[in-house]
Amino acid sequence: MAELKFYIRHQTNFLQDKFILVFKSDEAREYFQNALKGSRFEKVTSEFAENAARIGIHGKIVPYGYTLKLTKEEMSKLSTANWQETAELLAEGNERLYLEANNKGNNC
């Protein structure tokens, strides 16, 4: 299993100015960095990301990033009570999103 990498995505022009993003590949992270123009990715530890999900940063809730490629069953497992499994699911969802976008780009 690939080592997970944790980031806080900062973007003051978005409604949600911070997101927790977890990646298992550099390619997926680079895709998101290129797709989210004007965003800054701050590399953080798993513990920092977990604390941001539980208690927020500067009093603001920091949600998980993109979860649209997770199944309903996977979504039901997202919980800071089991951070390792949650982080793995978040990374898997981001990887699926990246692979789908990459495949669409290659099929044009």
Image (cartoon, rainbow, N blue to C red):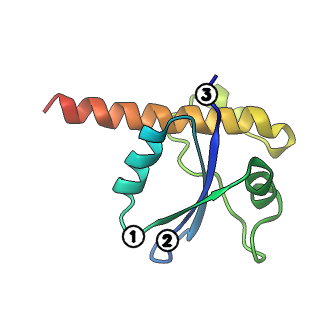
| Residue occupying the point 51% across, 72% down | 15
Task: Quadrant for residue 82, please give it.
Answer: top right
At label 3, the amino acid type is Ala
Indicate the position of residue 77 as horizontal and vertical percent values.
74, 32
At label 1, the amino acid type is Gly
- Which residue matches tag 2? 11
In this view, the residue farthest toward the right is: 81
Asked which secondary structure carries label 3, the reply is loop
Dot 3 or dot 2: first in sequence order is: 3
At label 2, the amino acid type is Gln
Packing grade of label 3 (10 A; few <14, some 14-19, many >=20) is few
Q: CA distance from mark 1 to mark 3?
A: 28 Å
| Residue occupying the point 28% across, 29% down | 103
Asked which secondary structure carries label 1, the reply is loop
Q: Please determine whether, in this image, residue 41 is positioned above or below residue 3.
A: below
Q: CA distance from mark 1 to mark 2?
A: 7 Å
In the rendered structure, are the residues bearing label 1 and label 2 in contact, judged by CB atoms less than 8 Å apart?
yes
Report the side of 9 relative to 50 (left or right).
left
- Which residue matches tag 3? 2
Where, quadrant-wise, is the C terminus in this rendering?
Answer: top left
User: Looking at the rendered structure, which numbered label has been put on residue 38?
Assistant: 1
Packing grade of label 2 (10 A; few <14, some 14-19, many >=20) is some
In this view, the residue farthest toward the left is: 108
Dot 1 or dot 2: first in sequence order is: 2
In the rendered structure, are the residues bearing label 1 and label 3 in contact, judged by CB atoms less than 8 Å apart?
no
Packing grade of label 1 (10 A; few <14, some 14-19, many >=20) is few
| Residue occupying the point 61% across, 30% down | 72
Q: Please determine whether, in this image, residue 71 is positioned above or below residue 79.
A: above
